[in-house]
Structures are given as structure tokens and as C-alpha cells.
Image (cartoon, helix red, strand yellow):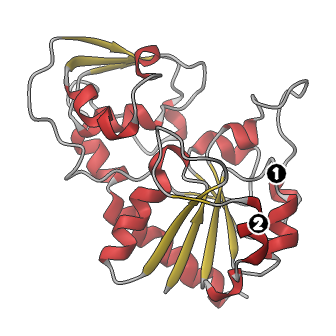
Amino acid sequence: MKIAHINNVANVPYTLAKEQERRGHEVKVFNLTKSHKYWSGNILKPWDRLRMNWKEYDVVFAHACSVVPAWLDKVIGVDNVIYWHHGTDVRGESLKGNEKAPDSCKLHNKPHIVSTPDLLKYCPTARWIPNPIDLEYWKSSNEGKTTLDLGLVKETPWQEMRDFLDRYAWFREFKGYPVYSYLATQAMAFNKPMTLEGIDWSLYPEQPDLMKPREYCRKYHDVRSIVTAVDDLLFEWEANK
């Protein structure tokens, strides 16, 4: 299968792409803007969007693109686009003057995936597929010494994030959302003890042991099972066309 990921949000598409390539798919990851220090991937410049033949891809995953959907609908204009929402593109914190973004699921007659369960409130017809983690990559190699607060990671390039996280013994997060962040998921993979404040655990299938959370991460975020879930969903959608 030939697959494209647009907008490499927090390296989630890149993580998916590596596993999809391991399974024999041809995969490319594109960014909408210039290369970001947190991300990897090709830059998708405006003229590239116009000249690319998107129909050559069996499926195009558009990540966090719902706040700028016009060019996706007009330029791609094919049935193989799947919108994958990651947070602010649906909640709308980045939209000045708006309490939340428009319900993008109603704007597009296309399949939708959400990465955290709270987003189902905005996109009730979407499917929740948790963020993927490569457990072989996110693996602790030493004992950290101090507590890591979420705000400390803002200036850390993604290439250095693994070693950065591993220097800390405890992870602490409070974002004001009822769901934990992707960074918290990475800390879970390290089996770091953690404090997660304000989480609504009723949104999740179970609550992890926050003193030893790696097994929970393996159960719900392992990239191998996540890509399998994506494959199963693609087959289901194709069968229901």
C-alpha cells in the first residue's frame, strides 16, 4: 500500500510510518510548514501541494489539518483522505476568539480518527486510536535524579527527547485537559513514576499503575498494535463504501 502522512504532529505520523514501512508499505511523511525542531519529515511547500498527484496514494492521513481544510479538500479532492485529529485542531485553543474549533467532522464527508478520547465529544462519529509508541526506542537506560515538569521540555529538539526524558526520575504533568499528553505516554514507556493531575480516567479503558506505567503503555500504545488497529479500520471503511 502507498501511504502519505501530512503534518508530522509531535512525530506521531513518523512513528506510524516507520512501522508501516516495516510491514512493507511505501510511506512518505510531509510537513505543512518549514522543518520544525520537534519533527522530522519532508517540507510540503504550497506549490508542491498543487503539483503532487495525491491520487497515486492509496490513503492520505491528514494530521491536525481540520483548522485549515480548504486546500486539502480542493487540492487533494480524492476519497482517500482520512482526517486524524490530535487536540487543538478540534478543541480550538489556537483559534483566537473561539471557545472551540468548528466541528470539523461535520465539515467533511470523510473518515476521522482522534488521538485522545476527549475529542470524541467534538467528533462523535470518529474512531479513537491512541497515540503510538515505539517501545524499543522509548526505553530507559539509566536512573534519573530529579522531577521533570512539562514546561521544561519546550526547548528540547525531538532528536534529543529520549535522552532528555531519561535523565529524570519522576514525570509530573498538569495541562488542564482530562487526558494525558503524548509526552506523558513517552514517559510511561520509560516506566517513569509519574503524577498526572486532572485526568478523567473514565474516558480510558483502565487506570495505569502510575508507579510502573510501562505495561499500560505496552497494552494501549504499542505502535505495532496501533498500526494493526489502523489497518483493520481501513479494511472496515473500504468494505462499507
Q: Indicate the quadrant where residue 183 lies.
A: top left
Whether residue 152 sits left or right of residue 198 in the image: it is left
Amino acid under label 1? Val
Q: Relative to 164, does residue 225 appear above or below in the rendering?
A: below
Whether residue 94 sits left or right of residue 37 in the image: it is right
Marks 2 and 1: which is nearer the front?
Answer: 2
Q: Position of residue 174 (x, y in %)?
A: 50, 16
Task: Identify which residue, 179 or 40, lies in the foreground.
Answer: 40
Check whether the beta carbons of the residues at disc 2 and disc 1 lie within 8 A of each other: no
Q: Which residue is mark 1?
A: 68
Q: CA distance from mark 2 to mark 1?
A: 16 Å
Q: Which residue is mark 2?
A: 47
Residue that appears at 69% across and 80% down: 54
Q: Position of residue 135 (x, y in %)?
A: 24, 51
Q: Residue furthest left?
A: 142
Residue 233: numbered disc? none
